[in-house]
Amino acid sequence: MSTSHSLTTQTVLVTGGARGLGRAITETFLREGATVVINYRSSAEAARELAEQHPGRAVALQADVRDREAVNTMVQQAQQQLGAPITTVVNNALVDFVFNGDARTKADELEYPELAAQFEGTVAGALHAIQAVLPGMREAGFGRIITIGTNLFQHPVVPYHDYTASKAALLSLTRTFADDLGPEGITVNMVSGGLLQTTDASAATPDAVFEGIAAGTPLRKVTTPEQMADAVLFFASVWARGVTGQNLIVDGGLVKG
C-alpha cells in the first residue's frame, strides 16, 4: 500500500485540540507521527504544554472558530511555522456546551438563539476551518476532513435540542462536501460518539447516567475519548482511502446504524 499520504506525512489541524476529546485526538495523531496544529480558544496553557512536549511536530495557535478571519490567520501562521500545508482537519471544537440532562432546555422553553449559538460554533466553525485549509489541500493534491457528530441522531435519549440540531446540520455538510470535494482527492467523514467518559463537557453528567449507558452497550462500558480518537485516526489513514461521506458511530454498540 502506498505510504505517500501516510500519517507521518500529514499536517493535522485539530480544532479545540487542547482539552477533552480534542486532546485525545491530538495525542493520538502525535503518537502516530503526524504533525499537529493544536487550535484553542481559551485553553492557552494546556495547548502550549502539549505542543512543548513535541517540539518541531506540534504548534499551539489561538483562534475562535466562529471568527473566519481569525481562522484564516491561524492557518497562515501554522503553514509558515511548519513549512507545510495543512492536509487534514478535525472539526472538534464545541463552543460553550455542557452535557447535563437535568439542566437542558425543554421543548416548550427552547428559543432560537440557543440553536443559533450552537450552529455558529459547530457549523460555521467547521465551514471556516475547511475553507481555510482547502488551498493547502489542493496544493498537496490530498485532503482528509473529519467532523465530530453524535449518536443522539438515532437515539435522542436526552433531547439536547440545540446540540443535536447543530450536529445534524454538520452531518449534512459532511455528506454534501464529500460529493463536492471528492474529485479533488479530498474525503469528508464523520465520527459520532455517545457520551464520553470523561471530558470537560461531560464532567457534569451524574455517575448514574454513565452506569445506565454502560449497561445498555454490548461492551458494558462507556466509550472513552481515546476510543473516539482511534476512529478519527482511521478516517485520516490510508486504510480509509476509499471511504467518504460516512458517519461512523463509536459508542460501544449502544446505537445500531
Image (cartoon, grey):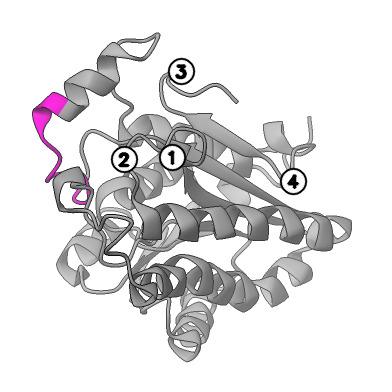
- Frontmost of labels 4 and 2 is 2
Residue depicted at 48% across the width and 75% down the height: 78
Residue 10 is at least partly visible in this image = no
- Residue 150 occupies which quadrant of the picture? top left
Q: Determine which of the numbered discs, if any, sits on residue 113 in the image.
A: none
Using a 10 Å C-alpha cutoff, classify the residue at mark 4 as few (fewer than 14 neighbours), some (14 to 19) or many (20 or more). few
Magenta stretch in the rendered image: 200-208
Q: Residue under label 3, please give it.
A: 253
Q: Residue under label 2, please give it.
A: 158
Estimate the spatial distance between the alpha carbons at disc 4 and disc 1, rounded to whole Å: 37 Å
Say if mark 2 contacts mark 1, CB within 8 Å.
yes
Which percent across, then down, holds residue 73?
Answer: 48, 87
Residue 98 is at least partly visible in this image = yes
Estimate the spatial distance between the alpha carbons at disc 3 and disc 1, rounded to whole Å: 13 Å
- Residue 240 occupies which quadrant of the picture? top right
Estimate the spatial distance between the alpha carbons at disc 3 and disc 2, rounded to whole Å: 18 Å
Estimate the spatial distance between the alpha carbons at disc 2 and disc 1, rounded to whole Å: 8 Å
The disc, 3 or 1, on the residue closer to the chain's N-terminal end is 1
Which percent across, then down, holds residue 115?
Answer: 40, 69
Estimate the spatial distance between the alpha carbons at disc 4 and disc 3, rounded to whole Å: 34 Å
- Amino acid at the residue labelled 3: Gly
Q: Quadrant of the C terminus?
A: top right
Q: Residue under label 1, please give it.
A: 152
In the displayed structure, 245 sits above or below 94; it is above
- Amino acid at the residue labelled 1: Leu
Say if mark 4 contacts mark 2, CB within 8 Å.
no
Q: Secondary structure at mark 1?
A: helix
- Amino acid at the residue labelled 2: Val
